Image (cartoon, rainbow, N blue to C red):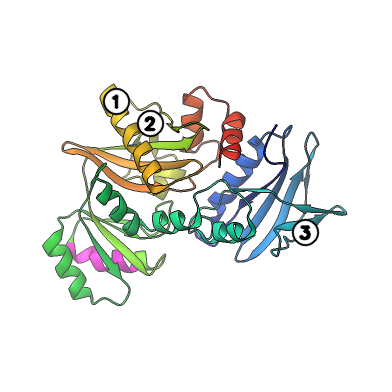
Amino acid sequence: MSKYKTIAVIYGSDSSEWEVSCRSGEFVASRIDGNEYDIYEIFARFGKWQLVAAKKCNSMRVTFPEGARPEVDKTDFSIQVLGERVKFDYAYIVQHGAPGETGQFEGYLEMLGIPCSTCDSSTCAIVFDKYACKCYVRELGLANCAPDVFVRQGMEPAEIDAKVQKELKFPVFVKPTQGGSSFGVTRVTLAEDLQAAVQFAFSENHTVLIEQGVTGRELTCAAYFDGEKVATLPLIEIVTDNEYFDYDAKYNGHSQELCPAPVSDEVRELVQRTTAGIYARLGCRGVVRMDYILADDGLYFLEINLIPGMTSASLVPKMVRAAGMDMTAFLTTIIEHT
């Protein structure tokens, strides 16, 4: 007997990743157990939350055309549809970027007492900011963190250049502190190209992280709570044709995603143990994915993906399949244990 009946799958976002979010949300909605839950797909962007499709338990999916989509009543997270007032009792959030990964949507649900599939609002706010997250992980001592320089909009270019010259070595990665899918990210090998990369990153966020590049194998691992313990999924190794795992490599086929990663048992256990430890210490919930570089001098933490991609070709679904698990059963575990 499930704890919930009416599931709202929330996709779309206020960020550059909104189209990826839609693909992820549609995939999740299609894999949630339709024999157990009523499933409502909500497209949410810039404060306008509309019903895209609905599938009652053991019934056909009904879609709503643009211009005739019922809107969510934000006072109680409900909707009037087909002559019925439906109040959602659980939200599966698949918003990449704001407001789903920033904690804003979670804060709204917390005030209404409605559970959801992700971390709580305070954890989201910390983890989604790459600089704040690195500060927390660095203090945990569970993995190495590359040296970095934090930049806020308004700092003098000469000051930024001087700090990078003093504290880092090229190549460096310049990235907005908030965001995903490699939007606004540049690999910089020459000092004279640094300021253009910083300005490009500012197009995504008002704070920027300049991080020393680390050479090694790129590995990623996901963790979730299975009802008894923090569990991890098989590792994936990213082998890209490009300089790094950028948007083109991620979405246009210019990379190989080796799952399970061809690593030793010792490395696999290290990455899974580190991922489970960070998940537990930061108080994560739902399924999150953590990215690393395995260098000659140890394992380096890169970032946490609070709401990782969930299309059929995304990394977490690949991990689930490699683990021999059914995607519908996996999503039921996430829903019932968050």
Of callouts 1 and 2, which one flags the residue occurring earlier in the amino acid sequence? 2
Specify the farthest residue to the right: 83
> What amino acid type is highlighted by mark number 2?
Leu
Task: State the mark number for residue 235.
Answer: 2
Residue closer to the observer: 180 or 300: 300
Of callouts 2 and 3, which one flags the residue occurring earlier in the amino acid sequence? 3
In this rendering, position of residue 120 left or right of residue 84: left
Label 1, secondary structure: give it. loop
Q: Is residue 195 magenta?
A: yes
Quadrant hosting residue 238? top left
The N terminus: image quadrant? top right
Mark 1 → mark 3, Cα distance in angstroms: 50 Å
- Chief SS of the magenta region: helix
- The x, y position of residue 41, in whole percent, is 69, 49
The C terminus: image quadrant? top right
Mark 2 → mark 3, Cα distance in angstroms: 41 Å
- Residue at screen point 77% across, 59% down: 70
Q: Which residues are magenta?
A: 191-200
Quadrant hosting residue 269? top left
> What amino acid type is highlighted by mark number 1?
Val
- Residue at screen point 53% across, 61% down: 104
* Number of residues whose C-alpha sits closer than 10 Å to that of mark 3, classed few (under 14), some (14–19) or many (20 or more): some
* Number of residues whose C-alpha sits closer than 10 Å to that of mark 2, classed few (under 14), some (14–19) or many (20 or more): many
Instruction: Say if mark 1 contacts mark 2, CB within 8 Å.
Output: yes
Task: State the mark number for residue 263.
Answer: 1
> What amino acid type is highlighted by mark number 3?
Pro
Dot 3 corresponds to which residue? 70
Specify the farthest residue to the left: 166
